[in-house]
Image (spheres, helix red, strand yellow):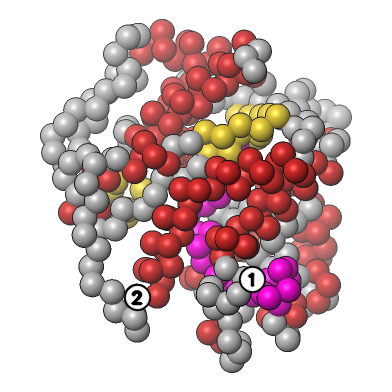
């Protein structure tokens, strides 16, 4: 576990300098064991954190990861319960309108919204309610995936400004195919200021109601901001100048930029949602946004949403371990 990560500028990055790899792994695995089973739910960012968490803890044998880029049904902006998922599976390709099932004929832009992404509630509730399970999940680590900004492409049932005349028949249909004015800029239907908040509230309300399913510690991991043209970044700190904006071809790029910049304020959105709708749960935020913004050079050149491994995700994982250490020691 001793490593030296070397980004573009030949700067060495070695966060583990005080312990041998065996000593560090022993400490980390003891923390994971002490806090009980952990369920990680999120997209590619959390996947990378979980990979690093496994490396630091010697496999994370008491933890599981479930891939879910969006956490909620894109139309209802709420998590789908196991019963909802079972009903959609049973209904097949022609579900009744009331179910608001994700479409089955996926285009590339709707892939993150597929039904399999939403089965994290089944993973959570299944273990909690299974009499044969030795220990239920004690900690739920959440992250909204990098695909959230694509929510602007689709109508939703709430708020009312987002509802189209076709109702649920328009769910999961790209707005460009609807033939009606529907935009991220529509009053009352703005993707981060309105729909993102509804999504956070939907998750909090689900967990509050699912008292039999979960009563432990929720940790929200924020997202690192995007770094446009990351292949041109060669040292920490500065971000490259964006390419000139083409209003005809660059709307997705602009929306991604808007999403990443807006996500800097997600922490307060989630705190407010859990304080209001799930006050019985312990809620914490692991903010990796600001520190990750300084390391544009830590990205994989071919994909600015992926990070070098070993690398920055191992720092996120160590931050998470420190937070779990406080949980183990009973810190407020």
- Can residue 36 be spotted in the picture? yes
* Distance in Å between CA atoms under marks 1 and 2: 24 Å
Task: Give coordinates of residue 77: x percent, y percent.
Answer: 69, 61
Seen in the image, is 138 located left or right of residue 114?
A: right
Q: Which residue is mark 2?
A: 250
Q: Compared with residue 197, is residue 171 higher up or lower down, i.e. above or below? A: below
Mark nearer the viewer, 1 or 2: 1
Residue projecting furthest to the front: 187
Q: Residues within 10 Å of mark 1 (few under 14, many from 20)?
A: some
The one of 179 and 290 positioned closer to us in this rendering:
290
The residue that appears at 72% across and 53% down in the rendered structure is 202
Q: Compared with residue 164, is residue 53 higher up or lower down, i.e. above or below? A: above
SS label for mark 1: loop
Do the numbered discs 1 and 2 sit on residues whose CB atoms are within 8 Å? no
Quadrant containing the C terminus in the rendered view: top right
Seen in the image, is 26 located left or right of residue 278?
A: left
Quadrant containing the N terminus in the rendered view: top left
The residue that appears at 57% across and 68% down in the rendered structure is 190
Marker disc for residue 188: 1
SS label for mark 2: loop
Seen in the image, is 24 located left or right of residue 168?
A: left
Task: Give coordinates of residue 224: x percent, y percent.
Answer: 41, 45
Q: Is residue 148 magenta?
A: yes
What are the residue bounds of the magenta stretch? 141-163
The one of 254 and 10 positioned closer to us in this rendering:
254
């Amino acid at each position: 576990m001793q490593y030296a990560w070397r980004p573009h500028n030949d700067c060495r990055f070695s966060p583990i300098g005080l312990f041998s790899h065996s000593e560090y792994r022993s400490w980390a695995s003891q923390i994971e064991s002490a806090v009980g089973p952990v369920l990680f739910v999120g997209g590619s960012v959390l996947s990378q954190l979980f990979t690093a968490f496994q490396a630091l803890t010697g496999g994370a044998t008491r933890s599981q990861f479930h891939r879910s880029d969006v956490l909620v049904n894109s139309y209802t902006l709420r998590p789908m319960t196991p019963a909802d998922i079972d009903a959609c599976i049973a209904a097949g390709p022609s579900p009744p309108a009331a179910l608001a099932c994700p479409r089955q004929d996926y285009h590339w832009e709707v892939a993150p919204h597929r039904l399999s992404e939403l089965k994290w509630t089944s993973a959570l509730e299944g273990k909690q309610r299974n009499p044969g399970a030795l220990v239920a999940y004690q900690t739920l680590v959440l992250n909204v995936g990098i695909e959230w900004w694509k929510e602007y492409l689709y109508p939703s049932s709430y708020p009312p400004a987002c509802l189209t005349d076709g109702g649920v028949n328009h769910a999961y249909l790209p707005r460009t195919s609807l033939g009606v004015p529907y935009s991220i800029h529509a009053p009352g239907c703005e993707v981060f200021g309105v729909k993102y908040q509804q999504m956070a509230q939907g998750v909090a309300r689900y967990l509050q109601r699912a008292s039999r399913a979960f009563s432990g510690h929720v940790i929200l991991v924020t997202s690192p901001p995007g770094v446009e043209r990351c292949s041109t970044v060669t040292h920490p700190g500065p971000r490259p100048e964006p390419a000139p904006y083409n209003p005809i071809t660059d709307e997705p790029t602009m929306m991604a930029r808007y999403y990443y910049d807006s996500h800097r304020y997600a922490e307060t959105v989630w705190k407010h949602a859990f304080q209001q709708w799930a006050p019985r749960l312990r809620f914490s935020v692991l903010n990796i946004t600001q520190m990750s913004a300084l390391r544009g050079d830590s990205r994989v050149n071919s994909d600015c949403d992926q990070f070098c491994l070993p690398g920055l995700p191992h720092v996120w994982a160590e931050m998470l371990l420190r937070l779990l250490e406080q949980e183990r020691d009973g810190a407020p």
